[in-house]
Image (tube, helix red, strand yellow):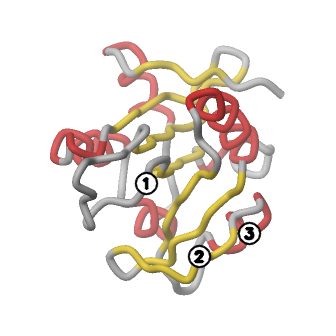
Amino acid sequence: MEVDLREIDDLVLQELRASILLPAEQRKYVGGTVDDALRDAAAYPEANPWPRGVYVDGAPVGFVMLSWDLRPDPPDPTLVGPWFLWKLMISADQQGNGYGRAVIDAVAEVIRPEGATELLTSYGEGEGDPSGFYAALGFVPTGDRHEGEVVAALPL
């Protein structure tokens, strides 16, 4: 399966708004909607946001956003990086098709040539949390926490 990670423009944003719908129990872990993610990106430009629409066979199926090559000097303790999976959303009607794994594989192919040796993410804990999903992809908790969330790393 090949996914296309498209830059966010007006058309992509319109398609994502119309098609990326998450169940309420997942929205609390991912932080809401695509628009919410883009507001976060605008509020934290120092995190070097890299938002992309996720497409399969020309149809939007999800959204991903990274902190791109985050190496502030001096280091900013409020940010995790250098390569941080900030948001990953696969529409409810597209979940279970392997798109989440395909997105992580596609992201790895993009960032590995840029010098990335691991991809970090964080997640909240509780009923319905994404810990099992991330573990199945190979993410391993680092022992660190960020804003109360578990930090996990995927070696690349």
- The residue at 31%/59% (across/down) is 79
The disc at residue 135 is 3
* Among the 4 quarters of the image, the one containing residue 30: bottom left
Mark 3: amino acid: Ala
Vertical relation: 133 (above or below) 100: below
| Tag 1 and tag 3, C-beta contact below 8 Å | no
- The residue at 50%/78% (across/down) is 150
Q: Report x, y in % for residue 18.
A: 43, 31
Vertical relation: 101 (above or below) 7: below
The disc at residue 142 is 2
Out of 130 and 92, give the one closest to the viewer.
130
Q: Disc 2 or disc 3, which is closer to the eye?
A: 2
* Among the 4 quarters of the image, the one containing residue 112: top right
* Among the 4 quarters of the image, the one containing residue 67: top left
Mark 1: amino acid: Gly
- The residue at 62%/24% (across/down) is 55
Q: Earlier in the sequence, mark 2 or mark 1?
A: 1
Quadrant into which the N terminus falls: top right
Q: Earlier in the sequence, mark 2 or mark 3?
A: 3
Q: Earlier in the sequence, mark 1 or mark 3?
A: 1
Q: How far, Cα to Cα, is label 2 from label 1?
A: 13 Å
- The residue at 42%/38% (across/down) is 68
Q: Which residue in the structure is indicated by mark 1?
A: 81
Q: In the rendered view, does 44 fall on the left or right side of 106?
A: left
Q: Report x, y in % for residue 154.
A: 68, 58
Q: How far, Cα to Cα, is label 2 from label 3?
A: 12 Å
Mark 2: amino acid: Thr
Q: In the rendered view, does 121 fall on the left or right side of 43?
A: right
Extreme residue toward the front, this view: 74
Q: Report x, y in % for residue 109.
A: 69, 30
Out of 104 and 120, give the one closest to the viewer.
120
